[in-house]
Amino acid sequence: MRFLLDHDVPDDVAFSLEALGHGVVKLREVLPVTTPDYEVLREAAERESLLITCNRDDFLAVAGRVPHYELLRSISPPKGLHSHRRENFSPYTE
């Protein structure tokens, strides 16, 4: 499965998905941070990737108007995770 990670998703999520054998593209590596949400959804559709974001509500506002690939998922970073450091992430943290 392929994933497109929004700018706000910690690198730890990418690390975990890649460790499981999934394809991962970090949005910040392919589009500017200022890219509008509708263009982010289009990018995910073009890449046939599942978009993972921490700001679901912003994307829900445009998801009905912009074709996107299958699903739109939202995550909440674990409490205390303030950086993109791998050692801060545990997939079992709530």
Image (cartoon, rainbow, N blue to C red):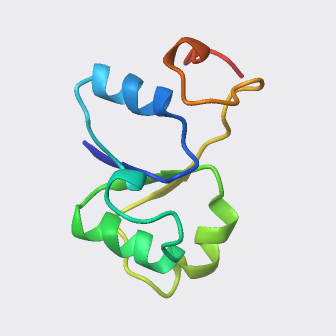
User: Is 88 or 63 nearer to us in this picture?
Assistant: 88
Give the residue furthest to the bottom. Answer: 65
* Residue shown at 34% from the left, 52% from the top: 29
Q: Position of residue 20 (x, y in %)?
A: 29, 22
Q: Residue at x 53, y 71 (%)?
A: 34
Q: Is residue 59 left or right of residue 86?
A: right
Residue 82 % position (x, y): 70, 30
The quarter of the picture where the N terminus appears is top left
Q: Horizontal and vertical percent for residue 92?
A: 60, 15
Instruction: Please give left or right for residue 69 compared with residue 80 in the image.
Output: left
Q: Residue at x 30, y 69 (%)?
A: 45
* Residue occupying image coordinates x 47% and y 32%: 11
Q: Quadrant of residue 51?
A: bottom left
Q: Position of residue 91 (x, y in %)?
A: 55, 18
Q: Residue 15 lies in what quarter of the image? A: top left
In which quadrant is the C terminus drawn?
A: top right
- Is 76 above or below relative to 43? above
Q: Farthest right residue? A: 79
Q: Is residue 20 above or below residue 67?
A: above
Residue 9 horizontal side relative to residue 5, left or right: right
Label tally: 0
